[in-house]
């Protein structure tokens, strides 16, 4: 696979210089985060965020959710910039793409087995029963999968909002 194929999308990476010092960046990263939970998607995939910052300037931001194969993970680094401030760079290393594929496969297998069993028992009425159930489950999981994708995309935006400060904004 060529190098271009391995490159992450822009919304999976952060790379900017903030006017904050490295110490101020660490303090901002270590503040408690309360993620919004006022939607159906947030109810279906409630998130908990954990941030770890090492003395070397490396940091790890993880957003976990129930039933996760692994949490959404952003790994990054804080480095002093030559012209003052701090250079913040990092990328999302674990996203929810595989989670969605696995959950979709499980749904397909369960629906197939349930449809086969109901068809054997109830003939055509079994399919009439399972189709509305499939649609309802797909709608719910679609909302969950959209919420997971939105949380993945929001992770880099959250980091920019938390750390990006221009020289004019520093007091």
Image: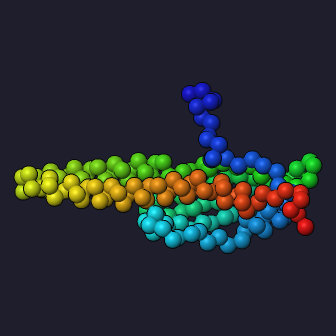
Give how far across and how far down residue 59 sits, in percent.
71, 58
Q: Which residue ends up furthest to the top in the rendered image?
A: 2
Mark yes or no: residue 72 visible. Answer: no
Which quadrant of the rendered structure holds the C terminus? bottom right
Residue at left 39%, top 50%? Answer: 102
Residue at left 63%, top 47%? Answer: 11
Most foreground residue, 162 or 63? 162
Give how far across and how far down residue 12 sits, in percent.
62, 47
What coloring was used for the rendering?
A: rainbow
Q: Is residue 64 above or below residue 32?
A: above
Most foreground residue, 32 or 166? 166
Give how far across and how far down residue 140 sits, in percent.
36, 60
Residue at left 77%, top 52%? Answer: 88
Count up the numbered dots. Answer: 0
Residue 60 shown left or right of residue 118 in the figure: right
Residue 31 shown left or right of residue 105 in the figure: right
Mark yes or no: residue 30 visible. Answer: yes
Residue 85 shown left or right of residue 33 in the figure: right
Give how far across and how far down residue 127 sits, in percent.
14, 53
Q: Which residue ends up furthest to the right in the rendered image?
A: 83
Most foreground residue, 55 or 127? 127
Residue at left 86%, top 62%? Answer: 169
Q: Is residue 34 above or below residue 13?
A: below
Which quadrant of the rendered structure holds the N terminus? top right
Residue 61 shown left or right of residue 15 in the figure: left
């Amino acid at each position: 696979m060529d190098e271009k194929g391995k490159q992450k999308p822009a919304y999976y990476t952060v790379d900017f210089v903030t006017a904050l010092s490295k110490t101020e960046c660490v303090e901002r990263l270590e503040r408690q985060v309360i993620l919004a939970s006022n939607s159906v998607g947030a109810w279906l995939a409630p998130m908990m965020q954990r941030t770890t910052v090492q003395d070397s300037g490396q940091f790890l931001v993880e957003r976990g959710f129930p039933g996760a194969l692994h949490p959404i993970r952003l790994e990054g680094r804080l480095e002093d910039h030559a012209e003052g401030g701090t250079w913040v760079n990092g990328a999302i290393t674990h996203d929810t793409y595989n989670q969605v594929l696995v959950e979709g496969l499980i749904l397909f297998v369960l629906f197939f087995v349930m449809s086969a069993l109901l068809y054997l028992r109830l003939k055509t009425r079994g399919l009439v029963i399972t189709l509305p159930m499939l649609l309802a489950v797909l709608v719910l999981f679609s909302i969950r999968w959209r919420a997971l994708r939105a949380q993945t995309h929001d992770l880099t935006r959250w980091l920019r909002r938390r750390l990006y400060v221009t020289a004019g904004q520093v007091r």
